[in-house]
Structure formats: C-alpha cells, structure tokens
Image (spheres, coloured by chain):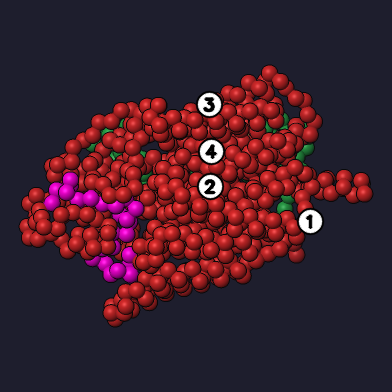
Amino acid sequence: MIERKERKPYWRHTKWQMLASLLPFIAVMIVLPLYADQLNQNRFIGFPLGYFLAAHGFFVVAVVTVASYVNRQNAIDHWHGAHEDT
Amino acid sequence: MTFSPRSRLVNPRLGTYFSIFAALFVAAFLLDLILEQLKFGDGTLRIAMLLVPFALYAAIGLSTATQDVLGFFAAGRRVPSGYTGLILAMSATGATFLVAAAGAFFFAGFDALVLLIGGLSGFVVMAMVLAPFYRKFGAYTVPSYFGRRFESKILRIATAMIAAVPILLVLAAELRLGAEIGAQLSGIGVYAMVFILIAMITMCVAPGGKRSFTWTGVAQSIAMLLALMIAATAVAVLVTSLPVPQLTHGPLVRGLVRNEVAQGLQLIQVSPFAFELPHDGFQTITKPYTQPFGAIGPLGFASGVIMIACGIAAAPWLLPRVAAAPGVYEARKSLGWATVFFGFAILTVSSVAVFMRDFVLDSVMADRVGPLPQWLYTAAAQGFVQFDQALSRLTFSALQFERDSVLFALPIAADLPQAFVYLLMAGGIAASLIAAGATTVSLAAILGEDVVQGLSWEPASSENRVWISRVFVAIAACCGGIITLLAPTDPLRLVLWALSLTAASLFPIMVLSIWWKRLTSQGALLGMVSGFGVAAFAIFASEAELLVIPSVISGSFGMPIAAGVALAISALRPEANRHDLEVVRDIRVPGGQIIYDREMQRLQLQKHART
C-alpha cells in the first residue's frame, strides 16, 4: 500500500507520464492525415506513402504508444510503492 | 507454495476451450465447402452455416450460467487481458465497423480511415485516461460509478437515462445489420430474423449476465476474425500470391492510383466540414480510392476522429468490460490488446475494399477485350450489384454496389466457392451478435441496477439482484428490436450518432471526475445534461437542415460545452466533501482494495448496526 506522503509525487509523476504519452499521439492523430496528399507522391512497398502511414503507420504508432505507456506506468507504480499487492 | 492472484483466478483451460470452438467453426466451414463441391442442396448449406455457430454460442451461453452477483455483473473479475481486449475491440467493431465499414472503404477509400484512426485513438485514450481508474473503482456500470463517486442518487439516475440512449442506438443498428445479413444468408425475412437474433442474444446473455456474455463474446469474436481472415487470405493468395492481405495490397493500391482517374473518376472537392460517408443501399463509385478528403473535408476528418475517439473511450457499453479484468495492470494491458485486434480487423477490412476495387477496375478498363466478367452476373443475381445486363462495356457510373454487401461480393469476384460467402455472412452475424450482446448486457445492468434499484444504495438480496437484471436482458433486447423494426435507419449513421452523444455527455465528465479533484456532483450533473442536450439538439437541427454542419459531427459541439459547464459550476459552487476527496485519491492509486466492494461492505455494516 502506498504511503501517505508518496501520494502527491506519485500523482505528479503519473500526470506527466500521461501527458508525455498522449500529447504526441494526439498531434500525430490530427496532423498525419492532413499531409497524406503530399506524401502520396512517394511509395513504400507498393503503397502510396500517405495512405500507408495513415493506415498501417498509425496502427503501429497506437500499439507502440499503449505498450510504452503501460510499461512506464507500471514502473512508476513500483517506484512509488503504489503497485497492486500480489 | 504461493499463488499470485492471477494464476489463482484465471481458468487455465480457456485456450483449450476456445481452440475447440475455433476448430469446430472451421470444420463447419470446410464441411460446407466439401458438400458444395459434392453438389449438395444450396438451402441446406446456408442453414447449416447459420445454425451450427448459433448452436455453439447457445451451448457456451447456457453452460456459463451463474447466480453469483460478482459473476453475473463482472464475470468474476477473472477475464485475462488478452480476452478482455479481444471483446473490447470486437464489440467496438461490431457488424457496422466490419460490414458497413467494408462498404465505406470501398466507396470513400482514404476518407473511411476516419473509422480506423478514431477507433484506435479511442482505445489509446481509454488506456491512459479512463480504464485503469475505472477498474480500480470496480463499479459494474457507468451510472453506479458516478453515483458512488459523488454519493448522488440523482446523478446516478440521470446518467442511467443519458447512457441508455446511445446504447439503444447501437443495439438497434447492430440488430438491423445482423438481421439483414441473416436474411441474406438464410432466406428468412428480415423481421423474423430480428426475433431470432433477439432470442439468440437472450440465450447468450441472460443465463450468466456478463459471465456468459464474456465467453460467448470471445467465441463470436473468434468466429468473426476467422471468417474475415480466411476469406481475405484466400483472395490475397489468389491475387498477390502472398497470404498477408493487410500488407500485400500495396501494388493494387498503386494500380488504382494510376488507372482510376484515367477510367473516368474525377477528383472531388468538398467543403472542409463535409462528412459524407456512403449511405446504405445501392450507389456508384465516384471517388478515386487514395484521394484524401473527397468525401470528408479536412476539418470534418479531424473532428470526426476526435468524436469517434472520445465516444469509444467513454462508451458505456465498452468501458465496464475492463471491470472484469483481474487487476489494474491487466486492465491496462487489455487496452493494448484491444488496439492490436481492432487495428488488425479494420486493416483487413480495408484490404478487402482494395481487392474489390481492383476487381471492379478490371471490369471497367476501356482496353478490356471479351465479354463482361462472369462474377458480375453472379453477384447481380444475389443482389449485391446492379447494372444493365444488356451492356457489353461498363463504366464506373454504370455499376451500382450495395454498401453492406461489398464484403460478401469479394469471394464471388475472386471466383471462390459460395461457401466463402456463407462463411463471411456467418462472421458478419457473429459481429452483430457480439456488439448487440455488449449493449444488451450493459443496458440490462443499467436498467436493473441503477434505474429500478436506483433509489436505495443497498442492493436487493443477491438472488433478486441477479433475477432483476436477467429479466431486463430480455426487455432490453426487445426494446432494441422494436426500434429496429419501427425506425429503420442507416446502421453506420446510428452508431456514429451514438458515439457523438457519448463523446458529448459522458466523456468529459468521466475524465474530469478522475483527473480533477474539485468536480462537484452538481457540476457533473449539469455538465452531462447540457452536453447531451446540445449534442442531441445539434443532431436534430442538422437533420432538419437548420444547421449546415453534418449531423454526424455536429454532436461534438456538446463536448466543450459539457466540460465548460462542469468546470464553471464546480468552481463557482465548491463543495468540500471528505468522502469524495478520499474516493478520488483512492481511484488514482492502483494498489489497495477495490473501492466499489469497500463501499458495499460499508453499507452492509451500517445496515447491521441499525438492525
């Protein structure tokens, strides 16, 4: 169980981790499709690059974002002693 | 020897059970394939592909019956992250994001990526902002969460009313699509099929509530993914010689870019706020596949992505799923799995659309010699395509496709046996069953827990509690069926409306209730109601053409309004409340007791002390 005086630093740490993971992701989510047209001039394994990045690329970005977030957040929990009791 | 909670809780034979199910499902398909080659009656094959999976789902549903409250409302909190993620992804997909989205990709091309990007972002947002905290709280329904978080019965009942609207919309959409596919597969009328689906859902959900829904849902998800993968992989092998449809359709896309404009498809300019995903019914291809923003404008695309993401993140029929995970870590991980499965399914759907576009391009090429390809006549005979059969030469404008049949036309276009069409239809029905089941089980729990017993915090005895919700499963399914029959509307539109209503009402309040300590119950209530009101009004105004913004995205106006009202009211009329503060502090820390259980124990102790 987490100690009382650890709660504030734990939550500050968690908040920054959330923002650090979420804000770049949201930026990619909004900006990437807007540039698809220019990127479509290039090609990658046969795909027009803009389409490939908006479909497959975004899928990879999402999976990597969640995976790295889960990893980091678990480490933060353990650092502050906020992890689940096993 | 010590056991960690996970190994103590999780059934070690789950993998075996679902391998058996997958083997049976594939065996049914292979048998269908063999019997078709042996010239068996077509009707028998169709009915077999409908009834064999139904029998399997019903068997799973009935064998997971439970009378235990924790089992009935949270599947015993022992669904491992992979399975939770699979159900989350597939109930968000449903038949609309499978069958209707195949059509949307087919007609709108690049612009249909709004569904993929929005859905993936929804799961990412849910993983970071909502899911672990909701799991720590451990409430069975979203209204119960709000009620206990703010200790407010009015808020609980108001949330139940608001959450019921989008849930019913999704239920109606899925039943409609499922019934249409079922009618195509079996030849039974659409109305009768709606009743069959309602009976099926009741059988899968009523015996054990969330527990039966979880395990029938996993089976249905597996059936749906298998159907999609088998058909798409078979076509990919035929067309590209590689069994990875998601990655190998690149050269085909390239071919579409080169040839479609030459064959008469013009680049389309739309207003920045346009949001015109293809409607249901027959229509022609008008837009080159890879052209961005020819059906949805850039601003419409961005707001559509945000709307779908926020709607999926706070969806009252998806979020309670994470409460069934064994712990907070598993809940976080399950969202990772959900992202993987959702992206995989939709990427496969987009590859299906590209294969179809390629077949269509082949048949309209100006330098093609010989008669029209045979598959067009076969597909026209089954009602998937319309064209003037007297013509010997076709253009894009002469070919009309049905949006919700594009997926099923794929095996016909690739000259595969009919059994592949039946397999895809069985997958489509499975998809509609899982989304309809997810909405039914959530709606039944909301009606039974938060509306009927909403005025008292002490729940009825566990026996009654389960039976009340069990009765509401049947009622909820019938309500969805009635809406389907009385107000037939485009299912994709219905789901997008539901997501925008959720994004406007529940999402901002849900986020604030975790991330902002000083949110008060009044602020939450007024914020939620005003957001919902504005969104609903904007949708009606846009449908009545009073508003130029398309109805599907106009609902997202409610989101900033809901957040603003909640912030303003809470800041102007602060309520210092020790209980609320204690609960928020506790939600934020993964370790420790589940808050909902602790509160229920506290109520029991108080009751004991009184008597």
Residue B260: x %, y % from top left: 18, 44
Both labels 1 and 2 in a single chain: yes
State which mark lies toward you, 2 or 3: 2
Apparent side of residue B339 relative to residue B347 in the rendered image (left or right): right
Judging from the image, mark 4 belongs to the subunit labelled B
Question: Which residue lies under the disc numbered 2?
Answer: B168
Which span of residues is magenta-colored?
A: B394-421
Judging from the image, mark 3 belongs to the subunit labelled B
The amino acid type, in three-letter code, at marker 2 is: Leu
Question: Which residue lies under the disc numbered 4?
Answer: B502
Q: What is the display colour for chain B? A: red
> Which of the pair A44/B333 is nearer the observer?
B333
Crowding at mark 3 (Cα within 10 Å: few <14, some 14-19, many 20+): some
Q: Which numbered disc covers residue B560? A: 3
Residue B447: x %, y % from top left: 65, 48
Q: What is the display colour for chain A? A: green
**B415 is within the stretch colored magenta:** yes
Judging from the image, mark 1 belongs to the subunit labelled B
Residue B126: x %, y % from top left: 55, 41
